[in-house]
């Protein structure tokens, strides 16, 4: 019954390919994003490190007879392996001895707190997959009429969208891509996003490295981070914002420590800057752009819902960009690429650059929709494209304004595509 209810994930193919190429594969990502369920689709045996009935015995065996925990049909899934980091070296040694690929799948929702610095990296034996909450294509909320892969290959067919209003997108943004929320009633789905933030603030942020952190300070920080989505806000700016919006303050060092913990449990995933070859002398800004791994973390932290977003289009725009980035990151994994942000010293900006490992790339601006926003986004894209030194790197494969709403996906006369997010797929 479990397999029948399983919604296929883009990570399914990535995991299958990596098991053919590597002795051990680590799937990492936020809790509740579906890592274990995805891994179980291909695992032949499973060890749950955090099973309350066997956790004590598992951790004891990890210290004394670790090989026993690795016995079982392969691929063997070692779930929440960060509880016993010594499993990594033990599995790596077994992979060397067996000389075969596809032996172990590790899943973890946190970077190990006590991993030995001298532990083997796994180079040559291990592969890594980062899973995120579901994209709209994976959750069944995108029709998939427009393929990013097709755009890279020069193929596109205009199409008409249905059921693509602002209220619906606002709900999908607040619900997030958590697999257990998909298909639930709106009330239940929105509650689950709040439960996630509650778990982070009350337990997860302290459990990651056994450092006690204050719940209310965590909540204040998450609210500030939500207000600074899609910006390059410095830690000092976040500290100032927290002080202005709450009575108590935190030092920059304290905030940095909290942010490091949130990265270790994959709550935040900031975006690196893109560094292309330009004809102009403009300096490229290298600060990372702030993002949650899922937009629902921001709305839940702020305790706002779909109707609140519709009334505050500025907040809608920044949190919609977080949703768009989440989806583009998932799709980029399928296309063997990564997503970056561009900004130069003159203020020219491009929200996302999907850069593939083969050197091709697409320029993407994220907008709610409407003629003015689309015109602004297209102008930014065309301006950036004109500054790229095509003697040193190729022209962009495509330029696209990705919108929250819109009745059609189409190609403008200037070559820029306008695509609603509800019809996009990898």
Image: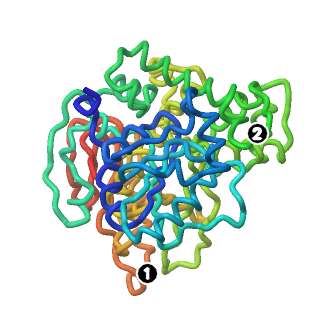
Q: Mark 2 points at which residue?
A: 210
What is the quadrant of residue 184 in the picture?
Answer: top left
User: For mark 1, does the 10 Å Cα neighbourhood hold few (<14), some (14 to 19), or many (20 or more) residues?
Assistant: some
Residue 150 in view (yes/no)? yes
Work out whether residue 157 or residue 271 is closer to the camera in this orientation and state it: 271
- Regarding mark 1 in the picture, which secondary structure is present there? loop
Residue depicted at 61% across the width and 57% down the height: 288
What is the quadrant of residue 284 in the picture?
Answer: bottom right
Residue depicted at 48% across the width and 33% down the height: 32
Q: Mark 1 points at which residue?
A: 389
Cα gap from disc 2 to disc 1, whole angstroms: 49 Å
399 left or right, relative to 229: left
Total tally of numbered discs in the picture: 2
x, y percentage for residue 307?
A: 45, 17
Residue depicted at 55% across the width and 22% down the height: 194
Work out whether residue 324 or residue 33 is closer to the camera in this orientation and state it: 33
x, y percentage for residue 88?
A: 57, 57
- Regarding mark 2 in the picture, which secondary structure is present there? loop
391 left or right, relative to 299: left
Work out whether residue 131 or residue 26 is closer to the camera in this orientation and state it: 26
What is the quadrant of residue 372 in the picture?
Answer: top left
User: For mark 2, does the 10 Å Cα neighbourhood hold few (<14), some (14 to 19), or many (20 or more) residues?
Assistant: few
Check whether the beta carbons of the residues at disc 2 and disc 1 lie within 8 A of each other: no
């Amino acid at each position: 019954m479990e397999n029948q209810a399983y919604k296929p994930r883009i990570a399914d193919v990535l995991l299958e390919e990596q098991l053919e190429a590597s002795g051990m594969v680590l799937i990492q990502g936020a809790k509740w994003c579906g890592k274990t369920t995805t891994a179980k689709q291909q695992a032949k045996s499973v060890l749950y490190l955090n099973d309350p009935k066997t956790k004590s015995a598992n951790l004891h065996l990890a210290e004394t007879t670790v090989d026993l925990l690795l016995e079982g049909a392969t691929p063997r899934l070692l779930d929440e392996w960060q509880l016993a980091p010594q499993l990594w070296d033990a599995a790596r040694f077994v992979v060397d001895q067996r000389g075969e690929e596809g032996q172990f799948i590790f899943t973890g929702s946190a970077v190990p707190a006590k991993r030995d610095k001298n532990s083997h990296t796994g180079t040559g034996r291990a592969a890594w997959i980062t899973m995120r909450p579901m994209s709209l294509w994976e959750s069944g909320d995108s029709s998939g009429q427009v393929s990013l892969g097709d755009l890279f290959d020069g193929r596109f067919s205009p199409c008409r969208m249905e059921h693509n209003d602002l209220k619906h997108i606002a709900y999908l943004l607040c619900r997030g891509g958590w697999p257990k929320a998909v298909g639930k009633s709106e009330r239940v789905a929105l509650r689950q996003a709040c439960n996630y933030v509650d778990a982070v603030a009350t337990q997860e942020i302290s459990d990651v490295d056994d450092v006690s952190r204050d719940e209310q300070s965590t909540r204040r920080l998450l609210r500030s981070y939500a207000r600074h989505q899609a910006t390059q806000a410095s830690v000092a700016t976040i500290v100032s914002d927290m002080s202005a919006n709450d009575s108590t303050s935190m030092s920059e060092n304290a905030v940095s420590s909290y942010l490091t913990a949130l990265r270790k449990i994959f709550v935040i995933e900031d975006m690196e800057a893109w560094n292309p070859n330009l004809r102009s002398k403009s300096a490229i800004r290298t600060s990372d752009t702030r993002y949650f791994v899922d937009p629902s973390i921001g709305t839940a932290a702020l305790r706002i819902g779909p109707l609140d977003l519709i009334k505050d289009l500025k907040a809608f725009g920044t949190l919609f960009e977080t949703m768009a980035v989440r989806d583009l990151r998932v799709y980029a994994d399928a296309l063997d690429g990564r997503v970056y942000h561009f900004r130069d010293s003159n203020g020219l900006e491009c929200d996302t650059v999907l850069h593939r490992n083969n050197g091709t790339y697409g320029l993407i601006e994220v907008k709610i929709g409407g003629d003015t926003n689309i015109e602004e986004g297209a102008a930014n894209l065309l301006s950036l494209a004109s500054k790229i030194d095509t003697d040193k790197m190729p022209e962009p494969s495509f330029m696209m304004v990705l919108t929250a709403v819109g009745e059609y996906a189409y190609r403008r006369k200037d070559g820029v595509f306008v695509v609603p997010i509800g019809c996009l797929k990898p």
